[in-house]
Image (cartoon, rainbow, N blue to C red):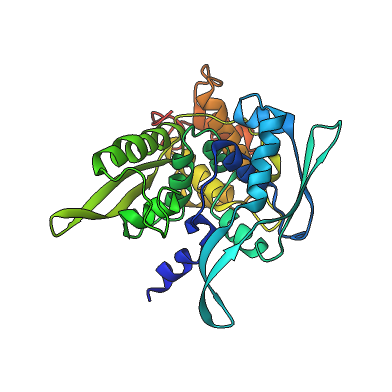
Amino acid sequence: MNKELEVRQANALTNARYEYTETQANIFLVLLSKLRKDSPDDVYQISVPELEKLTNRKLNYKQLRNSTEEMMSRVHKINTQHNRKEVYRQLVLFKRIDYILGTGTIELEFNEYAVPYLFDLKDNFTSFQVHAALNLPSKHAKRIYQICSQWKDKGQTRKVTILELKKTLGLADDKGNEEYTILAMFKKKVLDVAVKQINEKTDLHIGYQLEKVGRAFQNIVFTVRPQVPATTISFDLVPNLAIIASGTATHQVENAGRLLTQLSITTPALVEQILGNPAHIVACNKFAHDLKTGKHTNARSLSGLLLTVLGIKKATTGGPLFDKPVKGY
């Protein structure tokens, strides 16, 4: 098997068959943002006000408890390997979920068998991507976004059958029960909605292509490319992901590199200096956010301002580093 494909398929939780409601998906994403590789066995906490802030919606405590109760019993079906054998694994994620009365705090502890899959999944996300996924209204868009995030550097996802995708989205089971049996309805209610939301709200621009086998459409592949996000995020929402102990998140480096290109900061030594410094990368991401929220509108030279913010001496003359038009902001 192609090595690259094998590694990506190993991200078992992204491709596992399960269905979460929107509230359950949001809880899962917030937990994902809190995982720490230096303490994999930690107990994690979510405050309800924090969850409301991140999702921009009020939560009903009774419904929240019902949601987490269902998550406790939800079985994730995973194709994986164990003792060098291919296995079909049925896995639950949580050991326990406690509500600390009077505090608005939920405390969760993961099943130790689930922890490797969770860290495998987290490696595909930065603070922006978690926030973007939280704000996707459709639960199916959240799952499709996670799947496509694995393949943004390759241009398209692997080809799967439409039925396999439906099983991943919780729209079909192994007993033959299937929703949206008419393809036009599946496109209208699920695929087209997900594509529109992802393209409008995230750092990915996606599409999909259907493939016929005989007279019927049977397979699907998503096209994926990065884009400058149309929406902004507050950098204090998921602060523990801004910079991680082992280095800077890959996608933040990519975002910083795109900002430098858009500001025409292209001198190789200067680019290397900026992208080689984790603090500079965080500052570049913050600068990009400030641009999108309307700050720096009076700056004579955005590139010069960025270099000043970074503490890098600004050149005294104009030229290609500083005064070319800014694209994409």
Q: Residue at x 52, y 43 (%)?
A: 256
Q: Residue at x 43, y 36 (%)?
A: 228
Tell which of 143 and 131 is nearer to you: 143
Q: Quadrant of the N terminus?
A: bottom left
Residue 262 percent across, percent down from the top left: 42, 36
- Left or right of 188? Residue 269 is right
Is residue 251 visible to us here? yes
Q: Quadrant of the C terminus?
A: top left
Residue 113 percent across, percent down from the top left: 67, 66
Does residue 4 sit above or below 207 in this rendering?
below
- Left or right of 256? Residue 58 is right
Does residue 223 sit above or below 228 in this rendering?
below
Outermost residue on the top side: it is 298
Is residue 312 visible to us here? no
Tell which of 319 and 103 is nearer to you: 103
**Residue 55 found in image quarter:** top right
Residue 139 percent across, percent down from the top left: 49, 39
Q: Residue at x 37, y 73 (%)?
A: 2
